[in-house]
Image (spheres, helix red, strand yellow):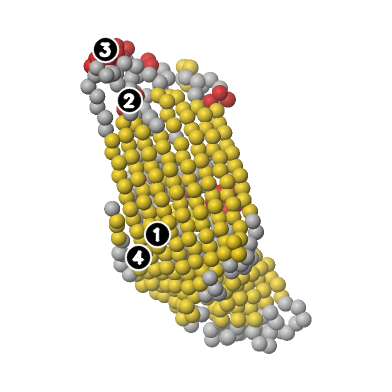
Amino acid sequence: MVRKLLGPVVLALAFPVMLAAQSQATTGVIRGTVTDPSGTAVAGASVVLRETQTGFQRQVATNERGIFVAPLMPLGTYDVTARAVGFSETRRTGVRLGVGETVNLTLPLAAVQLQAVVVEARQPVVDATRVENSTSLPDAAVSRLPNNGRNYLNLTLLTPNVAIVQGPDGDELSISGQKGIHNNVSVDGADFNNPFFGEQRGGQRPPFTFNLDAVQEIVVTSSGANPEFGRSSGGFVNVVTKSGTNQLHGSLHYYGKDGALSGQPHHAGATLPTPDFTQHQFGFTLGGPIKRDRAFFFLAYDQQIYDETKQTDSNRIDPLLRAWMDTAYGAAMRNDYGSIARTNNARVLLAKFDFNLSDRHHASLKYNYTWSEQASGTFDVDSWARSANGLEQDHSNAVNGSLVSYLTPNMANEFRWSTITTRACSCSTTSRSPRAITFSSSASSTTRCTQFRRSSGLETRGTSSARYRGS
């Protein structure tokens, strides 16, 4: 089913100090003031912003109040240089721009000197521009913190007001006490929600939806998100994936677990069955330049092979019921109370390409493929038998892109689009006797969704800003 989402147009006016830290889904804003040695604003100063890893560069000019604004800037670490006639050059290095952030700089020009003044930028302890309740998890947190299962959503539990609750199809996120279906999950500015149960694409069954090493930054907004990112009454999880740079880089990982390495479990004086499972998870990332300073690629692959035998204790079913199951309906349910072999396998691929088309246009294109399958994965309840379980499958293909254009020194436009196809299937599987009456069931659904979104930013005279958003 093709679904077209045509939302209302939102026009927001706000003072610069009230610019929300989560005002842009995949980009950020760098703004500031250029002054002379006496603190007077310098009009017409040239400010050059250069991203150190990709060579992306943008030049803006200050207005009559000495203010410059650069909206819709790609994420990264920037060197910012200010120049004006009659003054020496001033440069700020190491200016880090995170997703949705507004970085404010003060660039004081000095009298003419033989050497430029270089100042190293430092991240402020408190972001005074933030008006919503949001928490950022940068790459350092994503890559260095242990994460059993390597699902990026596990890291959201480190942020305030986020908890795990029982959902309709397994565990789901609850943000600020809201149901999981009320959350909004966005990856690279594109919809990443499950159209049926809510939560992330694929629901709660798949172990992951892309390689954790592909995540650049996660922002969790529990309340107060900008209206253009609302969509739901609950929380907003915004994820930005990595891009290639001028340097070839990559990673490899393997994680393995085996029940044979586990000890004998005990509970309340009783000896429990020994765990019987194996898990292998492996993948890689690779990114680099296609053409230096112009075109870049980034690939990420992850796979899991998981086997487990559960419900090994047949005494969990009443002996009288077991005896009836062995003979009823021509013994069609014989041994249906036996152990259950389960799987939880997954394969995911992410391919991303970024292009600096010119000094005024930046484009990005990404493909995301997910595949997951759980044999006998419908229920995990001790009192249920083999025939209560089925084969659970979820497949998806998604393509999304964006084009950021800097139309004038005071106006920028971002156009994003995405097309998603998902297929979920739940099929019953059970052993049956040829003498018995057989029952089978199968439910599947296919969803196709195409979205177009446009976001524009305008800054005038340094006193007010306007943003337009249509979808």
Classed neighbour count for the residue bearing mark 1: other residues with Cα under 10 Å, few (<14), some (14–19), many (≥20): many
User: Which part of the image, by quadrant, shows the C terminus?
Assistant: bottom left
Where is residue 396 drawn, in percent x and y? 40, 48
Q: Tell me the kind of residue under disc 2.
A: Thr
Q: Nearer the viewer, residue 368 or 406?
A: 368
Q: Is residue 403 left or right of residue 421?
A: right
Q: Is residue 314 left or right of residue 367?
A: left
Q: Secondary structure at mark 2?
A: loop
Tag 3 or tag 2, which sits nearer the N-term? 3
Give the Cα distance between marks 1 and 3.
Answer: 55 Å
Give the Cα distance between marks 2 and 3.
Answer: 17 Å
| Residue placed under numbered mark 3 in the picture | 327
Q: Are marks 2 and 3 in contact (CB under 8 Å)?
A: no
| Residue placed under numbered mark 1 in the picture | 418
Give the Cα distance between marks 4 and 2.
Answer: 46 Å
Where is residue 202 drawn, in percent x and y? 39, 45
| Residue placed under numbered mark 2 in the picture | 430
Give the Cα distance between marks 4 and 1.
Answer: 11 Å
Give the Cα distance between marks 1 and 2.
Answer: 39 Å
Q: Is residue 325 left or right of residue 467?
A: left
Q: Tell me the kind of residue under disc 3.
A: Thr
Q: Secondary structure at mark 3?
A: helix
Q: Secondary structure at mark 1?
A: strand
- When asked about the image quadrant of residue 118, the answer is bottom right
In the drawing, what numbered circle is on residue 471? 4
